[in-house]
Amino acid sequence: MLLLTTAIALALSAIPCCLSIWPIPRSFDSGNQIIKLSNSFDISINFTNPPQDLLDAVARTKDAIQTDQLGRLIVGRGSSDSEAFGSANTFHNLVLTIEQRAPVVRPIATEAVASLDTRDESYSLSVPLDGSAGVVSANTTLGLLRGLSTFEQLWYTYSGTIYTSYAPLTITNDNPAYVYRGFMLDTARNFFSVSDIKRTLDAMYLVKINTFHWHITDSQSWPIQIAQFPELAQAGAYSANQSFTPEDIQDVVSYAGERGIDVLVEIDTPGHTAIIGASHPDYVACYLSDWITFAGEPPAGQLRLADATVANFTAEVLAAVAKSLPSTMFSTGGDELDTACYSADEPTQMILNETGRTLFEALDDFTATTHGALHTLGKTTVVWEEMVLEYNTTTLRNDTIVMVWISSDDAAAVVQKGYRIVHAPSNYFYLVSINLKSSFLYMLIAVLFKDCGAGEWIGNDPTGNSWCDPFKTWQESYTFDPLANISSDQVSLVLGGEQLLWTEQSGPENLDSIVWPRAASSAEVFWTGDTLPDGFDRVGNISEALPRLHDVRYRMVQRGIKAIRLQPEWCALRPRACDG
Amino acid sequence: MLLLTTAIALALSAIPCCLSIWPIPRSFDSGNQIIKLSNSFDISINFTNPPQDLLDAVARTKDAIQTDQLGRLIVGRGSSDSEAFGSANTFHNLVLTIEQRAPVVRPIATEAVASLDTRDESYSLSVPLDGSAGVVSANTTLGLLRGLSTFEQLWYTYSGTIYTSYAPLTITNDNPAYVYRGFMLDTARNFFSVSDIKRTLDAMYLVKINTFHWHITDSQSWPIQIAQFPELAQAGAYSANQSFTPEDIQDVVSYAGERGIDVLVEIDTPGHTAIIGASHPDYVACYLSDWITFAGEPPAGQLRLADATVANFTAEVLAAVAKSLPSTMFSTGGDELDTACYSADEPTQMILNETGRTLFEALDDFTATTHGALHTLGKTTVVWEEMVLEYNTTTLRNDTIVMVWISSDDAAAVVQKGYRIVHAPSNYFYLVSINLKSSFLYMLIAVLFKDCGAGEWIGNDPTGNSWCDPFKTWQESYTFDPLANISSDQVSLVLGGEQLLWTEQSGPENLDSIVWPRAASSAEVFWTGDTLPDGFDRVGNISEALPRLHDVRYRMVQRGIKAIRLQPEWCALRPRACDG
């Protein structure tokens, strides 16, 4: 028995540690030898006139390598590595180079918002064993940035020595399988400060998430100050301290851009707009009416979409926000219209009768007006899936991007209509519970999916369980297959996906722990794609992924991002010892 | 429609706000008028030689009232209250008085660890409307402390003015329905610092939780330094920085005692002890063997209980820890013995054969030895339910306290055997998932209860769902009935209950948000009991409780405890508007 025990213990400790990068590069050749980082380590740029945001990114990378101070996740946290320090070479310099130089090397922030079909995040990276210079090469500054985020993850600290255990390392043409890799934050149910968002962007950068989907308003609050429409935030923000000034928005956009992150702002319309009634009561149907009858969650109220005045007002609001944003995309939402509300709303019924339209024909007109204003600004419009699958909106432009949220099963139907999609399925990617659905739809979803995981928040439900229990674990998210039921000729319509935090029960207090590291699951799903570098399927390969996810989680914590523990530390230090 | 809408809006805003105290006093008479706190407000003590920890508690209360700066949870956060500031009276002084003075007024810390049958936490409190002095009266300093925690919750701040909206207020003989109201933290699966624990004790004080059940060791790590057995932490702590010195333990005990909190330390034995094998491999069966076969979770290993040397060693370890603790209680654990491990362990089988005992007869001897050492120190021993219901241990003293965790349904069976119980049922009070059960027991529990809510943590389960999903919401915990299936003549055996955080997937990063305010649910269940002050049943009365729970949550956040949001802020400011 004792002999057996010892053998098992040795076997566990002898498992070689994989390259702990998240997301894992699509192709690499990694050694397991140690080189130390020179005290005078520097990163040099071998082309002229590098943009300022690349210089800033280099400075941040150099700083992170010094300050991470992460002990490697093995028993002893690197004490066994230290035996090789005496004989190990020293790494002095990393060189950044642009391979196929464009006429002008553009800033990271510019490349980060390039149109989806031209965006280039690819890079190659080498860290030789002999102490000669390493290289990150790319076609764009955005690619260089992705290389830097990989490079940062190579380094551990033991007793004052910074080193990597993965030398020699060669990563050749690492590039994302999908162009859209997002994270969505709802800043309306509960408010989050600019600093909360920046901390989140830091974590997104680390795992190469490239889109911040900012669900900025909803029925509960309007936290965005718009110069032309000051009344919206004055009446609709929880308080002046709980709203974003135009400068705040630009601050977030700049911070994101420098980290290679596109900011996709969503002003959800015509539903999810009750709070507009606080300043424009005539524009909102069912304002503060019984929510159980007229809304998916409290408070009730949605824009009187049939009213041309309301449509024009909405278009002006959207354009006022969109015109100052560099992204090519803007989301108008379009989910969860409550038709019972409109049926009971006399002004809506009067207009529909006068104009001889059905509600959804009026929605076609509303959409033409609001999307038209955004198209004039050069924006590609983004909507939730109901606009296509439920309302059959006829006035969507062909290049509209559709977010699939109700179920992953709906993706194929949207693609079959020819639209590009972003996967945001509640049954894989919802980080916490979302609005309660009223009526039959709710019951159906509850029975079909049983997702999300922080319980019910409606006040007087004694069980407190949610339609979207249980918790969507990182493992479940990680098994997502982006191409399930998608025919091969429609693969190009799948842009990628995102994990989402609806904030009925979240706030700054639990932001980090409810999001990280879970939201890193989809970052790898959509960067690495379906096949791991070793040729094995990624889907379902939890054992391979877990040690790397531990690693990036512990690194996040070193950076002040309070990511949740995945296992007892005993397991984190012993890869696969806690597999079942 | 518009008229109807307005009427509803008015109705919502007109709902009177209840006295927002958590836990709600068992008997009170509250007004809804405003008095302001004087700038020179003071708390005076009308008896001689008050103990230092009472003086400290008074200073903390005065400080908290100044620094909480909590805006009342109504629309405008108190702007409507401010209209009455001009005509409102000013409150200058709160007097603390001991009603039935004992020969000596004892410190709070002494009263906090008084034996359960003599502990006295009752108090009365008055805050007159006319500006005359308020009074907290009690039989003990511990009662005065409970009065102070109530008093602190009365005060809001608007635009620099501190005021209460509950005047005049009279609370008469508020006292707990149950003597044991606990919170359990596991500091072994993942480590928590002394400052994490102190912050938790602050929150416990606020909601009158009076027992910190410190599950200090487990199979994954041994974070307690014991002078006589230094090897245990040297080999078993995750690192020297991740262990508690004797001074740390005393620091926690003192901090807790000053806040009226008894510290019940648990050294779980003979199971949940694999890590002892790191320093004493001969004492541990199945050490690091295949956990799926030999343990409920990784790593495998449990004390060779049949070995008298091991029993004596264990008794010495327990005594070494217990002797320096002021509590009358000490827990030896006793849960989840893996019999397959002992069956396969040759040394154990050899000893059982030699001594002609069954495993459970050997457990009787082990228990007699270990509990005996604790009884010698004057401790009352505490165990998990299996010791009574599954192993039928014959050597438990009659005054043993039994914690019921597998299911609330097991409480009646333990009481019927004449033991006192603490409710800690996984199906109501587990704040997050616990160790995976192997074998049939696991399957059975999974089917029966489906609790807890952060998913599975075993490495290679692609769904990642846990036996204990979904999340145990505060609402579900709040509906717990301590006397379900307990016959009236056995009611006195029900000491109370506790919520529990097992930390497979928790650490300092999410401690506050996973615990608070959910752990406040049981605080009210066991303080207020089954009947609310208005005579209505507490059980299931979520609507009444929610606004008060919001209030204490927002107050916790003001105190730096990152309690999770229960609803969108829109709902928190509008009591009952988000009820279904």
Image (spheres, coloured by chain):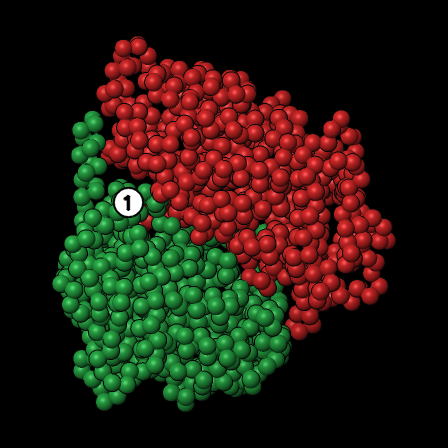
Chain colours: A red, B green
Q: Can residue B53 be seen in this view?
A: yes
* Residue A492 point in image, percent of width and height: 62, 25
Residue A433 lies in what quarter of the image? top left
The amino acid type found where label 1 is placed reads Gly
Camera-nearest residue between A528 and A93: A93
SS for tag 1? loop
* Residue A155 point in image, percent of width and height: 71, 55
**B29 in relation to A488, above or below:** below
Residue A347 relative to residue A406: left or right: left
Q: Name the residue under label 1.
A: B76
Q: In which quarter of the image is the C terminus of chain A?
A: bottom right
**B276 in relation to A120, above or below:** below
* Residue B211 point in image, percent of width and height: 36, 72
Q: Is residue B401 visible?
A: no
Residue B310 relative to residue B173: left or right: right
Residue occupying image coordinates x 41% and y 40%: A243
Residue occupying image coordinates x 48% and y 57%: B510
Camera-nearest residue between A93 and B389: A93
**A305 in relation to A534, above or below:** above
* Residue A548 point in image, percent of width and height: 64, 51
Camera-nearest residue between B54 and B378: B54
